[in-house]
Image (cartoon, helix red, strand yellow):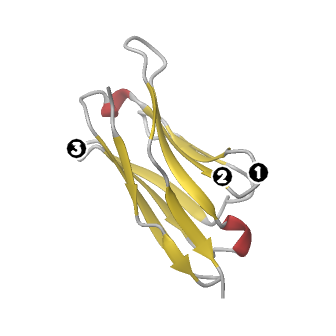
Amino acid sequence: QVELVESGGGLVQPGGSLRLSCAASGTIFSIALMGWYRQAPGKERELVARINSGGSTYYADSVKGRFTISRDNAKNMVYLQMNSLKPEDTAVYYCRLETTSYPLYDSWGQGTQVTVSS
């Protein structure tokens, strides 16, 4: 069992920045694919950014150039730096851990609310 705990959400004005953090338990973090997802009211959950064990990253088009995902394997942490925030970034942000080989894991955090509003 892997537990994920997100933090860093809050209320920010348009154009502002936030840094989300996700702490993972267990010993498989360094080999896991880590992702940040978000879900806005009335919408489906969507992938925002992802980083693999080698540090390769993927970003949704809507956040490219504004968000940066990073990881610290020594601390079992993954981060999402969000700059130039827009009202449409308002959502609950979730951290996800996946492994693609044995042992198989697919774990989600409880989510952290990000609200972008003036």
Label 3 Cα crowd, 10 Å radius (few <14 / some 14-19 / many 20+): few
- Residue that badge 2 annotates: 39
- What whole-number distance in Å separates the C-alpha atoms at marks 1 and 2? 6 Å
Q: Nearer the viewer, mark 2 or mark 3?
A: 2
Tag 1, which secondary structure?
loop
The kind of residue tagged 3 is: Ala
Residue type (three-letter) at the residue carrying disc 2: Gln
Where does residue 27 sit, x and y in percent of width and height?
24, 29
Labels 2 and 3 touching (C-beta < 8 A): no
Q: Which mark is first along the chain, 3 or 2?
A: 2
State how far apart marks 2 and 3 are (Cα).
29 Å
Dot 3 falls on a residue whose secondary structure is loop
What residue sits 63% from the left and 82% below the top? Answer: 15
Q: Which residue is mark 1?
A: 43
At 41% from the left and 33% from the top, the residue drawn is 53
Mark 1–mark 2 CB contact (< 8 Å): yes
Whole-angstrom CA distance, mark 3 to mark 1, is 35 Å
Chain-order first, disc 3 or disc 1: 1
* One can see residue 49 in this view: yes
The disc placed on residue 74 is 3
